[in-house]
Image: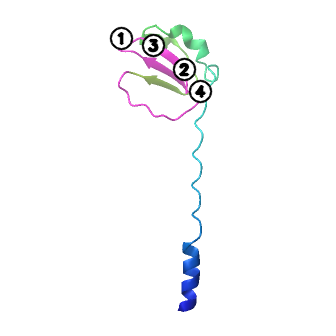
């Protein structure tokens, strides 16, 4: 029994493992990555203008008060809509 105590005491004195470093936050995407630069002409247009756009790939429409995840996807184009139902911002992410 006393031979079991010594290893337990030594284990209790061992240094604790370091926690892994947090993952770095991604840098903002280049506006050309998702095609946002080609759609900047829509800023200020009514939201119905999106009905005439052919957009291949992931799209997210963000209205005031919408819950939005913070996941970063450089291939996704985001359209922020203001309270007047106009496109306020177009960006990747």
Q: Which residues are magenta?
A: 64-93
Label 2 sits on a secondary structure element that is: strand
Residue found 57% across the figure and 26% down from its top: 57
Q: Which residue is mark 3?
A: 87
Label 4 sits on a secondary structure element that is: loop
Expressed as whole percent of the image width and height from the top left, the position of residue 70 reads 48, 34
Residue found 47% across the figure and 10% down from its top: 49
Q: Quadrant of residue 73?
A: top right
Q: Which residue is mark 2?
A: 91
Judge whether 24 appears above or below 15 on screen. Answer: above
Expressed as whole percent of the image width and height from the top left, the position of residue 76 reads 56, 27
Residue found 51% across the figure and 35% down from its top: 71
Q: Which mark is residue 28?
A: 4
Residue 51 seen in this snapshot: no
Measure the C-alpha gap from mark 1 to mark 4: 27 Å
Judge whether 67 appears above or below 78 on screen. Answer: below
């Amino acid at each position: 029994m006393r031979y079991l105590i010594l290893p337990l005491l030594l284990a209790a004195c061992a240094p604790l493992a370091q926690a892994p470093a947090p993952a770095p936050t991604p840098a903002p995407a280049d506006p050309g990555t998702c095609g946002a630069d080609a759609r900047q002409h829509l800023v200020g247009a009514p939201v119905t203008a999106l009905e005439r756009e052919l957009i291949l790939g992931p799209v997210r429409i963000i209205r005031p008060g919408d819950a939005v995840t913070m996941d970063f996807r450089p291939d996704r184009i985001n359209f922020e809509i203001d309270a007047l139902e106009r496109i306020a911002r177009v960006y990747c992410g």
